[in-house]
Amino acid sequence: MARIVVTATHGADDPNRATLAFLAAKAAREEGMETMLFLMNDAVLLAKRGTAEHIQGVGLAPFSEVLEAVQSLGVEIKVCKPCAEARGISEEELVEGASLAGMYDLVKAAAGSSVLSF
């Protein structure tokens, strides 16, 4: 099975880019690929409960709907632990299906995978 890692670095600062990363992960999973979404920098805010309802890209589906679709498909959502800690986000505050991870986790997942970056 093909594996894809989608990395995201933007949150509310660029709602289109943030949503497109999740849409890419959704599409990959729907195509039958093993899929990981890795959130870094301001993208970690996307995994904090209560944030999704406030993100809306231009001409795109509401972020909350895209997040729900990604979760229902079982996409693995990893959140950069140092990035989350720097923004005061604990693992208990993350949306369902998201967990904290480090750069070693990203590097291991990316080895032998296709990687898309947003």
Image: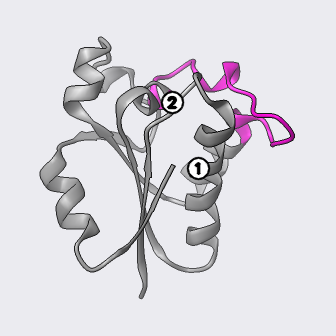
Which label was assigned to residue 22? Answer: 1
Amino acid under disc 2: Leu
Determine whether, in the image, residue 23 is placed left or right of residue 101: right
| Image coordinates for residue 29, horizontal then vertical, percent | 56, 69
Who's the residue at 51% across and 30% down the image? 46
Q: Residue furthest top?
A: 88
Which label was assigned to residue 46? Answer: 2
Q: What element does badge 1 sit on?
A: helix
Residue 24's image quarter? bottom right
Which of 10 and 5 lies nearest the eye of the viewer? 10
Residue 61: within the magenta? yes
| Image coordinates for residue 43, horizontal then vertical, percent | 45, 32
Picture mark count: 2
Who's the residue at 22% across and 73% down the image? 111
Residue 41's image quarter? top left
Amino acid under disc 1: Phe
Q: Is residue 1 above or below residue 67?
A: below
Query: CB atoms at circles 2 and 1 under 8 Å apart?
Result: yes
| Type of secondary structure dominating the magenta stretch | loop
Classify mark 1: residues with Cα within 10 Å, few (<14), some (14-19) or many (20+).
many
Q: What element does badge 2 sit on?
A: helix
Highlighted magenta segment, given as a residue range: 46-65
Cα gap from disc 2 to disc 1, whole angstroms: 10 Å
Who's the residue at 38% across and 20% down the image? 93
Q: Is residue 99 above or below residue 88?
A: below
Which of 16 and 48 lies nearest the eye of the viewer? 16
Residue 19's image quarter? top right
Q: Earlier in the sequence, mark 2 or mark 1?
A: 1
Classify mark 2: residues with Cα within 10 Å, few (<14), some (14-19) or many (20+).
many
Q: Is residue 90 above or below residue 29?
A: above
